[in-house]
Image: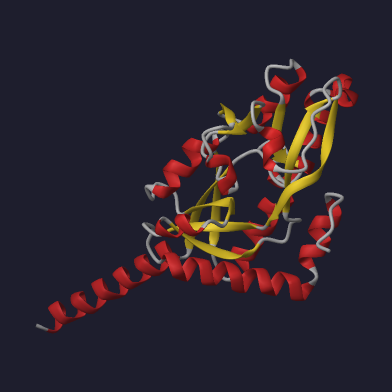
């Protein structure tokens, strides 16, 4: 009887350690969104390094899985096949699938348009866009005005494709983060940098977040752990140090 009792206690201890170990691991999907993160960047980019270190501050091990196609990345995390992803714009409708972290320590997305320098398109109001072919990314959540049927949205599976299409004049405008668009242009099309122009004013500024699937185990615990770890990194000056290494600022 004592032997059975001992085995019972042992099994409970093993199961407890197993659950604790499982809860201290997180698997995150990420894409290629230079200059913030990407498979080919040093340490997978500044945000990847910050995310991994923030979780480590709370005792978590983090595995990053690169999924270049945004729509697939989003769908896989919605289903709970990965614990979460970075980065994601907050939208009310996304709360049915995700828990959102505090704002990530990278500049808000300056969302707006690039055009070919040979065109004379401008943007003062959404009425200026009627009849124009606008390059967007499948699965991205844009301002609600773009749901109107009179806009011609040309979907690409990856953000890089819209810069290439704009250079070939297959679209009239590319709707994209300003910094990301310039990074793609300078790194992938260095001989054509002067062929595209950014249009002022931007459509808007959008903060980015880490998102954890509501289907993953201990979802709220993982969000809380990340937020606590990120706060700790800020207090230690680690966030500024990492961003500075990549030529960015947290201001």
Q: Would residue 224 be found to the left or right of residue 245 on screen?
A: left
The residue located at (56%, 32%) in the rendering is 150
Residue at the spot 74% in from the left edge and 56% down from the top edge:
106
- Residue 38 seen by the camera: no
| Colour basis | secondary structure
Q: Would you say 110 lies left or right of 69 here?
A: right
Residue 14 in which image quadrant: bottom left
**In the rendered image of this protein, does residue 239 appear above or below residue 122?**
below
Picture layout, residue 4 above or below residue 128: below
Residue 156: x and y in percent read 58, 27
Between residues 202 and 66, which one lies in front from this camera angle? 202
Displayed quadrant of residue 152: top right
Residue 42: image x %, image y %? 75, 43
Q: Is residue 226 above or below residue 249?
A: below
Asked if residue 212 lies left or right of residue 184, the reply is left
Whole-percent x, y for residue 112 in the image: 73, 42
Residue sitting nearer the eye, 3 or 237: 237
Image label count: 0
Quarter of the C terminus within the rendering: bottom right
Residue extending farthest right:
194
| Residue 63 position (above or below residue 105) | above
The percent coordinates of residue 182 (x first, y second) are: 81, 35
Quarter occupied by the N terminus = bottom left
Look at 56% across and 29% down and name the residue there.
157
Name the residue located 49 percent from the left edge and 66 percent from the top edge.
222
Q: Residue furthest left?
A: 1
Residue in the foreground of this view, choosing between 96 and 119: 119
Q: Is residue 122 visible?
A: yes
Spot the residue most to the front: 127
């Amino acid at each position: 009887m004592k032997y059975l009792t001992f085995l019972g206690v042992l099994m409970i201890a093993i199961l407890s350690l197993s659950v604790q170990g499982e809860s201290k691991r997180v698997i995150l999907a990420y894409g290629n969104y230079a200059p913030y993160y990407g498979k080919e960047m040093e340490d997978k980019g500044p945000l990847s390094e910050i995310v991994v270190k923030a979780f480590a501050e709370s005792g978590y091990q983090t595995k990053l899985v690169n999924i270049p196609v945004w729509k697939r990345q989003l769908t896989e995390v919605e289903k709970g096949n990965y614990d979460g992803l970075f980065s994601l714009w907050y939208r009310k409708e996304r709360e049915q699938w995700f828990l959102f972290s505090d704002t990530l320590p990278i500049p808000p997305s300056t969302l707006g348009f690039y055009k070919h320098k040979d065109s004379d398109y401008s943007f003062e109001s959404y009425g200026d866009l009627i009849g124009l072919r606008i390059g967007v990314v499948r699965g991205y959540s844009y301002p609600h005005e773009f749901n109107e049927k009179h806009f011609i949205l040309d979907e690409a599976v990856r953000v890089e494709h819209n810069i290439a299409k704009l250079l070939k004049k297959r679209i009239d405008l590319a709707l994209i983060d300003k910094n990301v668009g310039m990074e793609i242009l300078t790194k992938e099309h260095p001989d054509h940098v002067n062929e595209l122009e950014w249009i002022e004013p931007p459509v808007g500024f959008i903060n980015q977040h880490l998102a954890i699937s509501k289907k993953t185990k201990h979802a709220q615990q993982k969000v809380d752990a990340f937020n606590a770890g990120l706060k700790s990194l800020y207090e230690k000056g680690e966030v500024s140090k990492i961003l500075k290494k990549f030529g960015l600022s947290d201001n």
